[in-house]
Amino acid sequence: MNNNQLRILTYNTHKGFSANNRHFILHRLRDALRDTDADVLFLQEMQGEHSKHQQTQLDWPNCPHSEFIAQDSWPYHTYGQNAVYSKGHHGNAILSKFPLTQCENINVSPVTWASRSLLHAVITLPKTNQDIHIICIHFGLIGFERRRQFELLSKRIDQHVPRDSALIVAGDFNDWTEQSEKRFAHYFELKEAYQAIHNRYARTWPAWLPMLKMDRIFYRGLTVTSCDRPRHGLWHQLSDHAPLLATFEL
């Protein structure tokens, strides 16, 4: 990052397994993420613990996946579990090159059988001391579930993010019906980065032949200068989602 830019990447990591679930590819995934040189990562489906995979998968790290990916590249990171089962848990993670403060994981699941959450933190940029609120989300597959989750996210922003604060909300919205921007633009003055650059939403699923518009990067208080799906040749093998990478002017 130069003094006037911030690079943001959002990605559903598929728990460190290839799109077809046949191969554990976390090490290759980490290399690909490092190559993007992003300042802040919004990551979904990050494996925090899995006792069976730890015994059966070669090269399984002895720490949560968010810590493994963050090593030597993103000194500040936070993880919030949103799905708990007998063998472990997974959730959202934020990895940052800048200090994280006020980290909180909020349960937004209207049903007990599909745990979802949003991870809210604040980053403080060096030299400028500018605070930016950042929220990493992973919403549900069912319409009524997403509507309730949008309501809880809106309530969170309304109560915990000052109106004059810069804000980025990114993640896997599962929003192929394109309802999210209507809510965000009207009340919170949020724009979507890919749509602002290309006048359409990004197709990010499935990664090998993207058809559905699942992932978003919403923002305010910043100026977006680029937003694309990274062209790394292996992205379609590393998850069932494609990543989105945006650059902002501060």
Image (tube, helix red, strand yellow):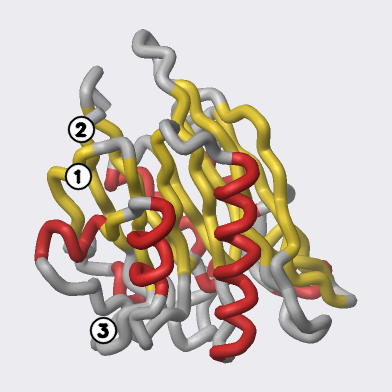
Amino acid type at circle 1 is: Val
The x, y position of residue 235, in whole percent, is 30, 68
> Measuring 32% from the left and 36% from the top, which residue is drawn there?
221
When the figure is inspected, residue 234 is found, relative to residue 72, above or below; the finding is below
The residue wearing badge 2 is 249
Q: Residue at x 64, y 76 (%)?
A: 148
| Dot 3 amino acid type | Pro
Q: Is residue 73 visible?
A: no
Relative to 161, is 2 above or below? above
Disc 1 crowd rating (10 Å Cα; few below 14, some 14-19, many 20+) is many
Q: Earlier in the sequence, mark 3 or mark 2?
A: 3
Q: Nearer the viewer, mark 3 or mark 1?
A: 1
Q: Label 2 amino acid?
A: Glu
**CB atoms at circles 2 and 1 under 8 Å apart?**
yes
Identified at 75% across, 79% down, the residue is 110
Label 2 element class:
strand
Image-based side of 228 in relation to 52, left or right: left
Helix, strand or loop at mark 3: loop
Location of residue 49 in the rendering, given as x and y in whole percent from the top left corner:
76, 61
Q: Earlier in the sequence, mark 2 or mark 1?
A: 1
Residue 151: x and y in percent read 60, 68
In front: label 3 or label 2: 2
Q: Which residue is mark 1?
A: 224
Task: Tell me the element at label 1.
Answer: strand
Name the spot of residue 91 as percent of width and height, x first. Answer: 66, 62
Tell me the quadrant of the picture where the N terminus can be found: top left
Say how many tags the image has.
3
Q: Depth check: 125 or 27 in front?
A: 125
Q: Is residue 131 among the parts visible in the rendering?
A: yes
